[in-house]
Amino acid sequence: MEKKWDGSTRASAFQVPAWMIQFADQKQEFNKRPTKIGRRSLSRSISQSSTDSYSSAASYTDSSDDETSPRDKQQKNSKGSSDFCVKNIKQAEFGRREIEIAEQEMPALMALRKRAQGEKPLAGAKIVGCTHITAQTAVLMETLGALGAQCRWAACNIYSTLNEVAAALAESGFPVFAWKGESEDDFWWCIDRCVNVEGWQPNMILDDGGDLTHWIYKKYPNMFKKIKGIVEESVTGVHRLYQLSKAGKLCVPAMNVNDSVTKQKFDNLYCCRESILDGLKRTTDMMFGGKQVVVCGYGEVGKGCCAALKAMGSIVYVTEIDPICALQACMDGFRLVKLNEVIRQVDIVITCTGNKNVVTREHLDRMKNSCIVCNMGHSNTEIDVASLRTPELTWERVRSQVDHVIWPDGKRIVLLAEGRLLNLSCSTVPTFVLSITATTQALALIELYNAPEGRYKQDVYLLPKKMDEYVASLHLPTFDAHLTELTDEQAKYLGLNKNGPFKPNYYRY
């Protein structure tokens, strides 16, 4: 006869296995720092040299690639030109395919190319650029070329260049000087090769971070005075331009694209909302649910990061210096703290301020074992990585763009991209959002280049509101979106032109 289930009997008869008792006793030890003896067995198998020496930019090149520096190679494209320096020109075909894919997700830029190609609004423009060199940037560069401009380009980040895309651009005839894993010396050499060309005087600058502008200003002052306009897209670069302007040293007009509505609200917010998770997943394979995260800065980038992590179930703290942004964070449901208050307990630290020394050596010393540290701001100065390059600390390369930095007691932190921009160094960003930024940059270049003398003085300007609205309107057909039109009566009542601009310059979206 089958016995009936007796919950009480079974429950009382159940004996806890010894291994469960052991686990219960030991689970509190789980998060403790590994000892020095056990450290190597816990880490991935790596070479002795990478364990005992500091990681370097060169270590981030793919192991299958030729380790010879591109500066030491003699390369020519199919047309016989050698006016470029990329990792491997033979990768051009693969890069071309990536560019063709990106074109499908950049409708506004392709529409601008088609509409303005006949007029050649950039005919005679000689643009020197320093941006991330990705498939999306390639679409922008080829659009500028189609509109009549001559371009020379370097990378603004030593880790974000897609080698195959750089090769495709070089094959197409663009003088490109960039490869993934440049050293600091390579970085400045590439910029100088773009600028210092016999018989070629740039008249426009497209910059991301201000390094190119700073280089020309310092090393080639006479060349700088002949520039017609500067377009800058990062908070760091814009800050540098305002400093020059305030000191009376900015002798050319500049367009602040970073603070345009289309850049702030779409690239900074929506792009980072998606790419922060992508970058962290690709580098650490971690799960976000229940993790404690501190996000330093609650501007548009910080807002995007916080929204994504909160949606994944993370416990998110925010640090801020601006009371308005701080109040926004509180109203959005995030706890506002000082970094010192939570640094010992958080699992992830993300900086996105554009400032320097946001995370100092003191903070790094106090972090828990296996804390992940990364940066989503443009500049690599937010995390004090230089302070970690000391004899008592050991660097282990785990995989491309991922380092363990190990303290003498065995504690380790996980540092991503050596403190440089996480999403473009370790993953990719949504092409559609970059279409918005790239179209804004192209229009800003056209505006500055064609502006009649006297329209723009030697100062920093925001993108005209009408141009912001035009960029947005070019992207609406992708969503089969239909704008409502004002009637004459409604336009008169609001005091607006039926075709815009629809908001005053002081309006905050």
Image (cartoon, grey):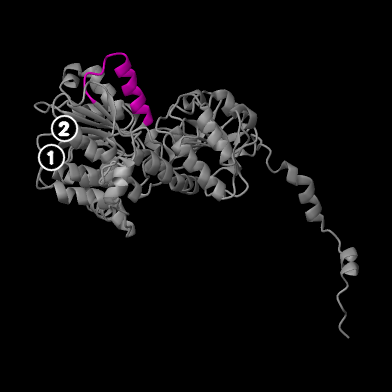
Residue 340, position as x, y percentages in the image:
62, 27
Residue 281, position as x, y percentages in the image:
49, 48
In what quadrant of the picture does the N terminus appear? Answer: bottom right
Q: Foreground residue, 81 or 496? A: 496
Label pair 1/2, CB-CB below 8 angstroms:
yes
Q: Foreground residue, 247 or 183? A: 247
Q: What type of secondary structure mainly makes up the magenta span?
A: helix
Tell me where residue 183 sits by quadrant.
top left
**Label 2 crowd bin: few (<14), some (14–19), many (20+), radius 10 Å:** many
The residue type indicated by label 1 comes to Pro
Residue 243 is one of the magenta-drawn residues: yes
Q: Is residue 230 above or below residue 24?
A: above
Count of marks placed on residues: 2
Mark carried by residue 121: 1
Q: Is residue 164 above or below residue 367?
A: below
Q: Which residue is mark 2?
A: 449
The boundaries of the magenta stretch are 235-253
For image coordinates 52% across by 23% down, the residue present is 391
Image position of 457 (left or right of 396): left
User: Tag 1's secondary structure?
Assistant: loop
Mark carried by residue 23: none
